[in-house]
Image: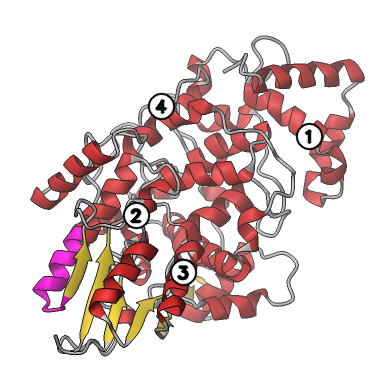
Amino acid sequence: MAELRHLVLVLGDQLDPDAAAFDAFDPAQDAVWMAEVAEESTHVWSSQARIALFLAAMRHFAHALRAAGRPLHHMRLDDPANRGSLAAQLHADLERLRPAALVMTAPGDWRVLQAIKDVATARGLPLEVREDRHFYGSVREFAAHARGRKALRMEYFYREMRQRHRVLMDGDRPAGGQWNFDADNRAAFGDAGPGRVPPRTVFEPDATTREVLALVARRFAGHPGRLEGFGWPVTRAQALVALQRFVAERLPLFGRYQDAMWPGEPWLYHAHLSAALNLKLLNPREVVDAAVAAWRAGAAPIESVEGFVRQILGWREYVRGIYWTRMPAYAGLNALDAQQDLPAWYWSGDTTMACLRDALVQTLAHGYAHHIQRLMVTGLFALLYGVQPQQVHAWYLAVYVDAVEWVELPNTLGMSQYADDGLMASKPYAATGKYIQRMSPHCRGCRFDPAQRSGATACPFTTLYWDFLLRHEARLAANPRMVMQVRNVARLDEAQREAVRARAAAIRRGEVA
């Protein structure tokens, strides 16, 4: 065998043939390494849909690499020689392949990066970790933005990114005359509901994907979720079709209804592109450019396009910067000292709370829920209940097909659970059941009353909201954005306080679910 110069390591969320790891790739002296290992599906109890998506996309990418003439060493999950973890498999393969050096694009998981670094050190091999060009900005640029700031507000970062990359700009002014159209993007559906929503873009599994689905059903039968109806894009060509369909069919109403919910309607006007973006099947620049082009052509309103661009150029870049400038300490944060266990019914959807049941059943069926279901239903309940944030993180990382730690962890610990003490969010996202009643019709068919904070019919969200304020009254009193809520809780007499505490305790004992 000819001496191997570079072994290029490609992880399951790095499926981009133009990634920096491939710069100057020479098929005469370099090779690619990929490994499907059980540990990546079991370090959190990953859903079957999430496992299947990663494996199917990896196998299609492996086919594409071979078709492009790039030598590939690909360990499949069902190979009897599989060592079960990235570190163990890499050790074994390095013994056989003996490259002079390792090359990779920066990964999206701190744990994985450390494991690979440890293997390289143990083998005495140089490891070159190259910048991930998939993103608009670098971690170094975000660190410069963050330097000297006690709090890192996305809005300021987002405006800088808009200006630097000339996105939705008219000269030095924001397109449409304002930076933020959130006030126009908070509509709920009327009593008649969303009407006819464009059908979700579904891709019929081919032979490779069917093989993966059968493997996952067999190997991970005890994992949560289902595989029926699996139709996620697993190739770049499919991802481009999904992007085109979103821009043409959903983007015009995306902004107006991006916070709205409706029972039994999981897809609504959302893009469903985050998994393809996070696997690197799509580049964020082409996604943003497609949305902006639709506005310039008069095919979508500025409110929708700005709201969508904010999610890609704003939040997505921002949370990555938070993750890589704050890890590994960030993963252990728990500013509110939340210590409750995640309720077991998060893994089954077996609850009488209509909004939670709908979000959880949908999540387990599809590996998907939109951002308001995540933040203001499943996340809000966990915050008010007092779940240990690391358990909330593990659940989100496990159940959603688009979950990669760099994006999921800050959104969960910082945005949703306020575990970072306000580094990301200026106040806890705490609300009563009245928020859910305003944004959806779930409360109509629910046995709980969102207007009641105590008593047998009180909505658990509302009870736990008041209990949350009582438990953290002193801390929240120092937050200028919580002044009104703290004043409201101060008006409760001792009997009212005790009624809230008693009802909250019953909820945590499982007597109300």
Q: Secondary structure at mark 1?
A: helix
Task: Estimate how packed mark 4 is, as few (under 14), some (14 to 19) or many (20 or more) residues with alpha carbons within 10 Å.
Answer: some
Q: Is residue 9 left or right of residue 320?
A: left
Q: Which residue is mark 1?
A: 469
Which of the two discs, 4 and 1, labels the residue nearer the N terminus? 4
The alpha-carbon separation of the residues under discs 4 and 2 comes to: 23 Å
Residue located 42% across and 72% down the image: 119
Q: Is residue 388 left or right of residue 505?
A: left
State whether residue 334 appears in this view: yes
Which of the two discs, 2 and 3, labels the residue nearer the N terminus? 3
Q: Residue furthest top?
A: 456
> Residue flagged by tag 3: what amino acid is it?
Leu
- Residue 146 percent coordinates (x, y): 66, 74
> Against 131, is 259 above or below?
above
Seen from the viewer's position, the closer of residues 34 and 408 is 34
Mark 4 vs mark 1: in front? 1
Which of the two discs, 1 and 2, labels the residue nearer the N terminus? 2
* Magenta span: 59-71
Mark 3 vs mark 4: in front? 3
Q: Which residue is mark 2?
A: 275
Which of the two discs, 3 and 4, labels the residue nearer the N terminus? 3
Seen from the viewer's position, the closer of residues 420 and 184 is 420
Q: Which residue is mark 3?
A: 113
- Residue 45 percent coordinates (x, y): 42, 41
Mark 3–mark 4 contact, CB under 8 Å?
Answer: no
Mark 2 vs mark 3: in front? 3
Task: Estimate how packed mark 2 is, as few (under 14), some (14 to 19) or many (20 or more) residues with alpha carbons within 10 Å.
Answer: many
Q: Which residue is mark 4?
A: 263
Seen from the viewer's position, the closer of residues 232 and 224 is 224
